[in-house]
Image (spheres, helix red, strand yellow):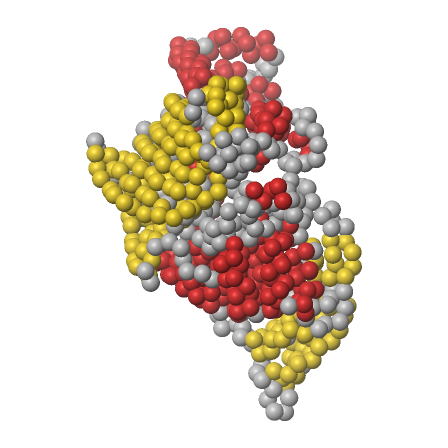
Amino acid sequence: VFLLVGTVIGIGWQLGHGYTHIEPGLYLATLALNAIPFVLLAVLALFLQVLSNNKFLGYLLTILWFVAQIGFGLLHWEQNLYNYGNAPSVPYSDMNGFGHFLGAALWFDFYWASCAVVLLVLAALFWVRGTDAAWRDRLREARARMHRPAQLTLVLALLAFVGSGSWIYYNTNVLNHFQSSTAKLRQRADYEKKYAKYEDLPQPRITAVKADVDIYPYRRKLEIRGHYTLVNKHSAPISELYVNFTDGFTVKSLVFAPHDTVSADKALGFTVYRLKTPLAAGASMNFDFTLEYAPQGFTNSPEGEFLVHNGTFFNNQVMPQFGYQSRVQITDRNDRRKYGLKGEVPRMPKLGDEKARANTYISNDADWISFDTTVSTAADQIAVAPGYLQKEWTANGRRYFHYTMDQPMLNFFSYLSARYAVKQVEWKGVQIGVYYNPAHAWNVDRMIQAVKDSLDYYDANYTPYQFRQLRILEFPNYAGFAQSFANTVPFSESIGFIADLRDKSRIDYVYYVTAHEVAHQWWAHRVIGANMQGSTMLSESLAQYSALMVMKHKYGAEQMRKFLKYELDRYLAGRATEKLAEEPLAKVENQQYIHYRKGSLVFYALQDYIGEDVLDRMLKQFLLDKGFQPPPYTDSQEFMDALAKAAGPQWKPLLDDLFWKITLFDNRITDATAKKLPDGKYEVTLKVHAGKVYVDGTGKETKGTPDIPIEIGVFAASPGKGQDGKPLYLKKQRVPDGDSTITVTVDSKPFDAGIDPYNELIDRVSRDNRRPVTLQ
């Protein structure tokens, strides 16, 4: 049974991850890796049956062990050395294969397989034959059966078990530092307890970065020689530097102004330096460092996904950062209580907090920087960073690439290296390039077209694209996202390059994600919000809106309902699991279900109500007013003031419902009938219900009254699978609170009808807005 379950799960895992196209050998290997735990469990079940001399008791003990392993996870007993049959997972990437993760899993599988052989030998020795089931008789029989083959097998298996276990311990606990999730949480708590006192103390700002980065993908080694220019932008001298170093990176050298080391907390990566001569207001200083990442051996769980054989991808967070980093604070209320953290659960600064406008929401130690980097990699790979390629050369069997950005950019940059194929086209003065695994060319043209369409829309309706180049780069599916840096967009293989979109009824998410990431070149890399509530509305929600407009013009407004319904369902699911308190969109605190899901719905509905041209004109002016703004950074209040002015006072109730309140509509259609008129037209009668409630952050509801027009629609039959029918009637109109009947006349045979039929409003139930029309 266990063998069968393991095989089924192995096959299901591969089908679910879309790996049916890989080579038969790899397919069998991944199948085996997923089946091994069940093989080991089958051996344990056999041993427990022999031990108990009762088949059903053996099954029960096996099930109890299986349940206990779940409990081990809850207790954070996570070391695989004492969890029978456990091994590190082996994340498979179609781009990077099994990478460096396979070795650790094989060592643990060998360790537990040796244990399983011991159990099998013991089971054979103590197997009851005949009627003598007493332990004294079984021990006597076991001694009699201990022949040389059994002795040799048992000794070799025990030696293999102990020897491999010692090797695993050396790798996971000596060469590497094993930490349970409990220890990691405690470390975060300690960081807050010790260093939150430095949060508001002034630090210099990074104004220029020059870095030489050497990537050794096959050796899994990384060397970074960095040069920061730091400027004191405060009114008083700065006497101390608070520097954060990334765990796992060794500081090989550190050179800056004469200083003393006050404290160096290697466990938490926080060091305090006292400058012998304080940095005067307006003065600058150099800060030079050399870092090395060279992991040895293997770990208890997969680590180091950012540096792999084919598809390295990391960003500047591995480099030194200044000041207390609040993003590592624990936000779970129970965990804070458990680890003795006092005060309220940390949240983003409130909208209107003027002090918080000194920083963007992505960085507290830099504003806009100048950037220059040289990156080297293996001879068969291409390395890419933001900026424009100035020079490429080969030396000592390695490839070098020198990139420079010719204008200020955010202190947010990345490095990628892989065996890339490159497709480049020029589009209206912009060089578009897609860097991809040569076997993954399926969606490259789709991405290029999405970039072209996005640039066309954003250039025409916002401001001209600020760069001369835009590159999309594939990275392994160890993360399932795309991320926008200045003129550079890393893009996970799983959501783009190996996406199967042959079914035309599916949402074209490759096109959509590409349009979203291109939009970030405006929403974040031109205008970025302050570190306070509402900041991610100005980046993520507006990138969502921009991508939706590109999608609408590509596929037509009639085809947007599927995406909007998906976003609505995801928003409703997200708010159901909110641990703190939900905020309205204009005060979002970086919750993805709000700034992505709700943001899509709100801005799409907004352009449909006030007009796409009105909204785009307002966005263009906002980009002109706030683009590349130094501190104090803009916020969602300034955005909403500009939006209210552009929309006009007649739309204040709509803006309140969408942005300033948590509003849930209760719109549904309960019946739809039609009768054919003598002139060939159809009279359609709809019975609808309209309503809404306001919800506070804790979920308490207050009844509201519908006071905005709600769309009523009647539609023809669908022209194909997954497509909406053409609207025969579509109009926004006032609908009374509660139940009402609406009658409209259409020119041809209706198929279905609805209230808010495209799911633009935040409705508590997404599936009851439409229903088929019954002909009388």
Task: Please name the residue shown 44% across and 48% down the image.
Answer: 484
Quick check: 55 above or below 133? below
Query: Dividing the picture into quarters, in which one does residue 349 lie?
Result: top right
- Left or right of 623 in this view: 55: right
Q: Residue at x 40, y 55 (%)?
A: 466
734 is higher (above) or lower (below) than 40: below
Against 509, residue 112 (above or below) is above
Q: Residue at x 29, y 41 (%)?
A: 402
Q: Position of residue 107 (x, y in %)?
A: 41, 24
Q: Residue 51 at what x, y percent from top left?
A: 57, 18
Question: 117 or 238: which is nearer to us?
Answer: 238
Q: Is residue 366 visible?
A: yes
- x then y, percent, for residue 356: 60, 42
Q: Quadrant of residue 650?
A: bottom right
106 or 601: nearer the viewer: 601
Image position, residue 769 (x, y; %): 65, 66
Q: Is residue 477 above or below residue 46?
A: below
Q: Quadrant of the C terminus?
A: bottom right
Front one among 122 and 327: 327
* Residue positioned 36% across, 36% down in the render: 210
Q: Is residue 494 visible?
A: no
The reply, left or right, for residue 453 in relation to residue 722 is: left
Q: In the picture provided, is 212 more to the left or to the right than 315? A: left
